[in-house]
Image (cartoon, grey):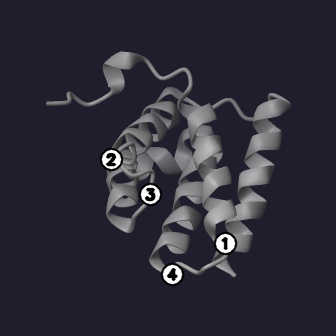
Amino acid sequence: MPHERLTSLTAALAEDLDHGVWAPEPLERTLAARLLLACAGDGQFTPARLREPLWEGSVALTYAGGGRLARFLAHLYEVTMHPAPDTDSALSDASRLLERVAQDAAPATYPAVG
């Protein structure tokens, strides 16, 4: 099931962050921050909200950090395209991971509000 793959990938990326195996690059941090900002109103990931960072990252995102965030966002997109009642936990874990990835994004990378 898509959410099981997302859960597995989220755990693996979190572990890699914990052990310093993966250090998200500026592009990854910026796109994670922008996605979180887009979801700030209701906290929900949607296909439309996920398309923006995937489009913005384009080809470069598939190379940044070995393409880890690109794969993660692709799995997250798949889960949001085919929601199931038991995906809440996977989406919560995904949100926490994105918060960690975005943690060091410079404030100037956030789009203007207003």
Residue 103 percent coordinates (x, y): 56, 25
Residue receiving disc 1:
3
Instruction: Pick whichever of labels 1 and 4 is earlier in the sequence.
Output: 1
- Residue 44, numbered label: 3
Q: Nearer the viewer, residue 102 or 45?
A: 45
Q: Nearer the viewer, residue 72 or 35?
A: 35
Instruction: Answer few, some or many: residues within 10 Å of disc 4's Cα (few below 14, many 20 plus, some between 14 and 19).
Output: few
Neighbours of disc 3 within 10 Å: few (<14), some (14-19), many (20+): some
Residue at 73% x, 35% y is 22
Classify residue 68 as left or right of residue 74. Answer: right
Residue 67 appears in the figure: no
Observer-nearest of 31 and 81 = 81
Screen quadrant of the N terminus: bottom right
Q: Is residue 3 visible?
A: yes
| Residue 1 vertical placement versus 113 (above, below) | below
Callout 1 amino acid: His
Classify residue 54 as left or right of residue 90. left
**Front of the two marks 3 and 1:** 3
Q: Residue at x 25, y 31 (%)?
A: 111
The quadrant of the picture occupied by the C terminus is top left
Q: Are marks 2 and 1 in contact (CB under 8 Å)?
A: no
Q: Amino acid at mark 4?
A: His
Separation of residues labelled 3 and 1 (CA atoms): 15 Å
**SS at mark 2 in the image:** helix
Residue at figure coordinates x 44%, y 42% from the top left: 36
**Amino acid type assigned to the residue bearing label 3 in the image:** Gln
Query: Tag 2 or tag 3, which sits nearer the N-term?
Result: 3
Residue tagged 4: 82
